[in-house]
Amino acid sequence: MPPPAPRPSSKPTGLDCRLAVLGADVRLTPHRREVFDVLAGSTDHPTAYEILDRVKSRSPGISLATVYNCLDHLTTAGLIKQVQLERGQSRYCANLHEHVHFHCDVCGKLIDAHPAADFEVTKFWSLPRGTNITRMDLVIRGTCEACAAK
Amino acid sequence: MPPPAPRPSSKPTGLDCRLAVLGADVRLTPHRREVFDVLAGSTDHPTAYEILDRVKSRSPGISLATVYNCLDHLTTAGLIKQVQLERGQSRYCANLHEHVHFHCDVCGKLIDAHPAADFEVTKFWSLPRGTNITRMDLVIRGTCEACAAK
DNA sequence: CCATGGAGTTAGAATCATTCTAATTCTAAT
DNA sequence: ATTAGAATTAGAATGATTCTAACTCCATGG
């Protein structure tokens, strides 16, 4: 069967508002908005389950499936980042400034590290000609201040 | 009860041989050896399950649990690296030269990228004083040569 | 205004990767 | 040979995520 004709994009009214400032293209439904707000108000890179817990205080009825759904939409739109450190749960982060992550091998804490100087991937690693780079995820690992002091 | 006295480290004989060249400290049992060999002979960063498949041709009886067990030991010993790109399966890599990974968002291919110049994390990202860095994992994302050409 | 359709939401089931458990086998040092 | 610790195993258990199918909501068009 033929693919369905693309639906004419509706004007942003009502729920169809967008975070224009950030150039993102998602409908910010109440749940998505709350998930985003919770994440924006957290600095500890919560897991999906932790986010559910925090969103519940405002929207008691929300389900984990919806949290995952919202997180996926927000990630696709570039409003948040998914951080995959190791096997198991993904963590999420709404720090939209350019940054990388430091992970303490001892206590497991995740710390944002902000750029001190401009950095160009291609200066340091060679990739096949024609490769198109869109972004990079850097995880620095070691022992954090507090754990190193012990 | 008192902790058991540390077992006197035995001399490497028989299976207790070690990959001295690499400075690793694991007993290389036949299975671990085979898992390592399969990985060393692969450039496609296989998953645990793919490794099982490949090892099976030599050791038909090996189980997935043993593959995971071997992979964990080899990873701990620093003989291989575990690469976590996204939710889902971990991938493994026996490229022991310093390198980072490029991941194609279109076809999912994972490519090793080798350093072209010396790189110091602390030149580019600021971390709290006292932080002790032991290693870093960089994933560059974008579109690979072949997919970009389309 | 009401009907329609698409997107959002939901609970719960299903899936998938990984880890655990308990029994068994192997290895190296008594 | 005996023994203790490590490795291995199958299968069960767990945990995170995704899927499914029903349901709701809103914007649009008749």
Image (spheres, coloured by chain):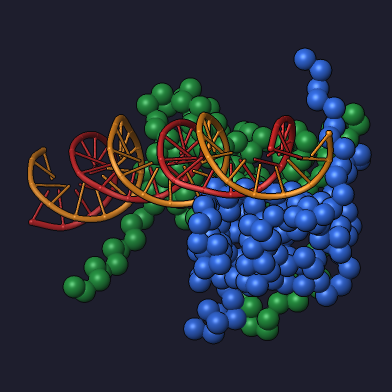
Chain colours: A green, B blue, C orange, D red
Q: Is residue B115 above or below residue B36?
A: below
Residue pictured at 72% horizontal, 72% vertical = B113
Quadrant of image for the N terminus of chain B: top right
Q: Residue at x 82, y 54 (%)?
A: B13
Above or below for B32 versus B104: above
Q: Position of residue A50 (x, y in %)?
A: 55, 31
Question: Can residue B33 be seen by looking at this rendering?
Answer: yes
Image coordinates of residue B110 in percent, x first then y, are 61, 69
> Can you name the residue that lies furthest to the top here?
B1
Q: Decide if residue B74 is on the left or right side of residue A88.
A: right
Would you say A82 lies left or right of A35 here? right
The answer to whether residue A86 is left or right of residue A15 is: right
Q: Residue A12 at what x, y percent from top left?
A: 39, 52
| Residue at 55% across, 62% down | B59
Question: Does residue A75 appear anywhere in the picture?
Answer: no
- Residue situated in front as seen by the camera: A21 or A143: A143
Q: Residue at x 38, y 48 (%)?
A: A16
Foreground of the two, B11 or D11: B11
The part of the image, by quadrant, that contains residue A32 is top left
